Amino acid sequence: MRIKKLKLVGFKSFVEPAELRIESGLTGIVGPNGCGKSNLLEAIRWVMGESSAKSMRGAGMEDVIFAGTASRPPRDFAEVTILAERSDDSADSDSGDELEVTRRIERGAGSAYRSNGRDVRAKDVALIFADAATGAHSPALVSQGRIGAIISAKPQERRQMLEEAAGISGLHVRRKDAEQKLRAAESNLVRLATILADME
Ligand code: ATP
């Protein structure tokens, strides 16, 4: 998966609609301290489904919404859209090569996701990115202090990184889903057997 564009509105310091094109090769973002460089990386993690407000440097998830300044009122919502090109080997390739995922948060209403124009769940978005060997916790997104954390990671955490890099972390979620369905089917069979025994 190659990220081609990032669109933001009302996200942290990006109060006005902003668009960042990520061309092939190296894209650098430069600017003075506090201008919002880290906010861009956080926007990528957030749209991929980041659920920890702390890792977004906030107390609650609504802290990602533009909080206002002395001269500008706060916003009621934040929205980030990521545009990416999918490689053919991704598990969910039926919707074409282009992938557009949007996450929007409104004060008091929480987050909602859209994928290529359709409403989807946070879990679906996590699976889309996990299948493409990326996601909100991908080691490819190296934020400040992350290198130290990777060096001192426990073996289990290192294994998670390798699984993410190999694009198999989505399989764990699917296995959990399948096990839940299996348990539900087993309890239905037990109920069915009881009903049949009562009828005989
Ligand atoms: P440095 O070079 O020091 O690491 P940076 O360019 O990475 O800085 P960021 O940390 O991305 O900068 O941006 C911090 C700025 O974002 C601060 O000015 C902060 O006030 C602003 N900011 C963060 N959250 C919000 C918010 N919810 N509303 C408005 N501004 C915000």
Image (spheres, rainbow, N blue to C red):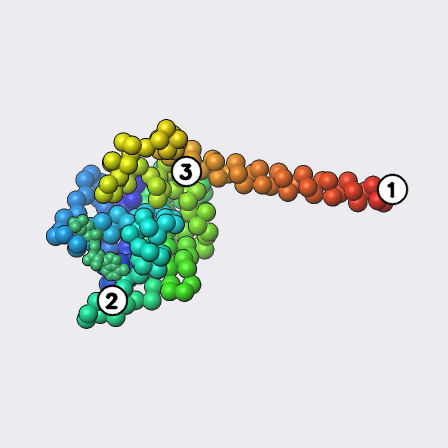
| Left or right: residue 143 compared with residue 123 | left
- In this rendering, the label closer to the viewer, 2 or 3: 2
Q: Residue at x 39, y 31 (%)?
A: 156
Mark identifier at residue 200: 1
Instruction: Look at the picture and state if 83 lies above or below 9.
Output: above
Mark identifier at residue 131: 3
On-image quarter of the N terminus: top left
For marks 2 and 1 on the same chain, the one whose residue lies earlier in the sequence: 2
Identify the residue position indicated by label 2 in the image. 68
- In this rendering, the label closer to the viewer, 2 or 1: 2
Q: CA distance from mark 2 to mark 1?
A: 71 Å
Q: Residue at x 24, y 36 (%)?
A: 147
Where is residue 136? Give x, y as percent. Answer: 35, 44
- Give amino acid for label 1: Glu
Instruction: Look at the picture and state if 42 lies above or below 185.
Output: below
| Left or right: residue 86 compared with residue 197 | left
- Give amino acid for label 2: Gly
Which residue in the rendered view is the most extreme toward the left?
32
> Which quarter of the frame holds ligand 1?
bottom left
Where is residue 131? Give x, y as percent. Answer: 41, 38
For marks 3 and 1 on the same chain, the one whose residue lies earlier in the sequence: 3
